[in-house]
Amino acid sequence: MLTGAGGALATAIAQELDDAGAQMVLVGRGEALARAADRIPATEVIDVDLADPASVAQLKKVKVDILVHTAGAYSMQAVQKATTDDLRAMLDANFLTLFHAVQGVLPNMIKNKDGIILGVSAAQAARNTGPGAALYTASKAALGAYLNSLNDELKSKGVRGCVLYPMGAIDTPANRDAGLKWETMIDPRGLAKSVAHILTRPDRAHITDIKVYPDEEE
């Protein structure tokens, strides 16, 4: 199951996993999901708002052994001007969506004693700092802490958690439009290959977190 289907990173991951022969369930919203479904073969396509608790019941109808969660959002607010609504928006987009997706897929994973749940965090969360993005950083840090705890709690039941940290902006049309130089951004195809690497490790070589840097920061 791939959430955020239609986004730049999810599209690269879907192409990489399709090349590897994976059967995919695409989860997303609206036109972006429809475009993804046109390009990527999928056993099922689910248009659902993962911030809505009702999404859990819908996801439970699909049996998967891997969840790759890329759904999320980015927003900047000065600390002194941030509102409760700003905080809720970041937590809903970056943490609550993961929480509901996990609730949807976890029962079947535990039943089968087999599952991998991978979520995408952010460089700010890995560094525990995000000037101008305190709420975003906190929401992405929550995602990482949740998956690390999930891994510790459920690895004995065959379910593992992993956090992917892109240590820089991802090369997307939106980031290019924002004026970021491609030389300083991470190619989503490289991140997709990292995801495929994580998902194909032997049982005794599980990766719990991985940081991927743009060339300029190596």
Image (cartoon, rainbow, N blue to C red):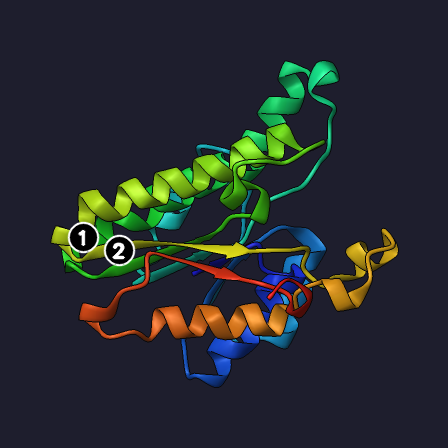
Residue drawn at (20%, 61%) of the image: 114
* Residue 205 point in image, percent of width and height: 24, 69
Q: Secondary structure at mark 2?
A: strand
Amino acid on which the number 2 mark rests in the picture: Arg
Residue 43 visible to the viewer: no
**Disc on res. 41:** none
* Residue 107 point in image, percent of width and height: 23, 47
Front residue of 40 and 210: 210
Instruction: Identify the residue position indicated by label 2 in the image.
Output: 160
Front residue of 13 and 168: 168
Residue drawn at (62%, 50%) of the image: 29
Local crowd size for mark 1, using a 10 Å CA cut-off: few (<14), some (14–19), many (≥20)? some
Give how far apart the Cα atoms at labels 2 and 1 are.
5 Å
Instruction: Identify the residue position indicated by label 1 in the image.
Output: 155
Residue 214 visible to the viewer: yes
Q: Give the quadrant of the C terminus.
A: bottom right
Q: Give the quadrant of the N terminus.
A: bottom left
* 50 shown above or below 161: above
Q: Secondary structure at mark 1?
A: helix
* 102 shown above or below 195: above
Amino acid on which the number 1 mark rests in the picture: Lys
Quarter of the image where one finds residue 153: top left
Q: Earlier in the sequence, mark 2 or mark 1?
A: 1
Residue situated furthest left in the rendering: 156
